[in-house]
Amino acid sequence: MAGWIVGISFSTIVLLIGIYGALNSRRRLARNKWAWWFILFGCCALVSAIINYQFR
């Protein structure tokens, strides 16, 4: 039951770290591939948490 809460919390944290890294890299005019990987992973984790919540 609490698995989707953990999934949504984890994906939100990873997504926020990725967004912060992407915005900070644009401000510094540098490329951060890890930020975009964090954003992608956070979106996938969020979709997975939503799917697991709906099919319970």
Image (cartoon, helix red, strand yellow):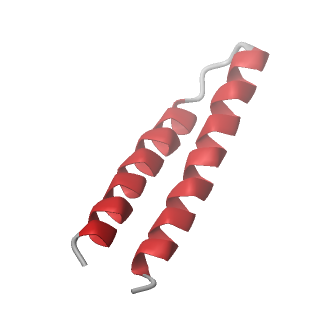
Percent across and percent down for residue 39 are 50, 40
Percent across and percent down for residue 56 are 25, 79
Q: Relative to residue 45, is residue 52 drawn left or right?
A: left
In the displayed structure, would residue 56 be above or below residue 12? Answer: below
At x 56% / y 47%, what residue is drawn? Answer: 15
At x 69% / y 18%, what residue is drawn? Answer: 26
Of all residues, the one furthest to the bottom in this rendering is 1
In the displayed structure, would residue 6 be above or below residue 34? Answer: below
Which residue is nearer to you in this view: 11 or 33? 11
At x 59% / y 41%, what residue is drawn? Answer: 18
At x 51% / y 44%, what residue is drawn? Answer: 38
Which residue is nearer to you in this view: 41 or 1? 1
Of all residues, the one furthest to the right in this rendering is 28
**Residue 1 sits in which quadrant?**
bottom left
Q: Relative to residue 46, is residue 24 drawn left or right?
A: right
In the displayed structure, would residue 31 be above or below residue 38? Answer: above
Percent across and percent down for residue 12 are 57, 55
In the displayed structure, would residue 5 be above or below residue 20? Answer: below
Which residue is nearer to you in this view: 15 or 21? 15
